[in-house]
Image (tube, rainbow, N blue to C red):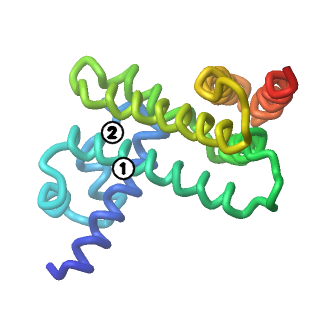
Amino acid sequence: MTGRRAATTTTQILTTAMDLFSGNAYADVSVDQIAQKAGITKMTLYQHFRSKDELALECLRLRLQRREETLDQFLAGLAPGANRLLAVFDWLEEWLDPKRFKGCSFVKAVNELSGVLPEVREIARNSRQKIRQRFAALARHGGRESPNELARELALLFEGAQSLALIERSARPARVAKRVASVLLQA
């Protein structure tokens, strides 16, 4: 298998697995299902990933990478002078579109897998840390006092909006979180 073809197959496996894992319980998704939906053999899947657990961990890492890239692109497209701290919540509202959002993959993975795959908890912590770091960097760049404390508060609003979005099947919690963030920023 050529390098490009192998990369394409790996991407197809990851994309398929992320879709299946996000819409179903981990235990309910089989390697056979992933292979069939990806249009490959089970043997081909195992040539790319040693186990379903390894595949699940790589899916989480890729989901985090994609989230960060998408948010980077969104923020880079804002006009100069835009309030980037509040704009994160605009991005979140798009991300929480109920037609696509099936819950936070990191919370779901910790709930389902952390007992057998401790690495899941570390990836989830990394996800949370990246959001707090982003808020802190934006706060520092905007000249805010106590940027780390503000980042913790904004990250809590961000995380809470994600949880409520799944329960309510609505992106509305991101708008509410943005309003509360605006009050914090004015204080």
Q: Amino acid at mark 1?
A: Ala
In the rendered image, the vertical position of residue 128 relative to residue 43, given as above or below: above
Residue depicted at x 74% and y 46% = 84
- The image shows residue 63 at horizontal and vertical percentages of 44, 47
Give the side of residue 43 with respect to residue 71, left or right: left
User: Closer to the camera, 78 or 108?
Assistant: 78
- Name the residue that disc number 2 marks: 29
> Which residue is drawn at the image coordinates 72% and 38% (left, top)?
143
Image quarter for residue 176?
top right
Give neighbour class at mark 2: few <14, some 14-19, many 20+ (Cα, 10 Å): some
Amino acid type indicated by mark 2: Val
Q: Which residue is mark 1?
A: 17
- The answer to the question of whether label 1 and label 2 lie on touching residues, with beta carbons closer than 8 A, is yes
Above or below, 48 against 91 in this view is below
The residue under the point 24% across, 49% down is: 32
Q: Closer to the camera, 50 or 77?
A: 77
Query: Disc 1 versus disc 2: distance between alpha carbons?
Result: 9 Å
Residue at 25% x, 65% y is 40
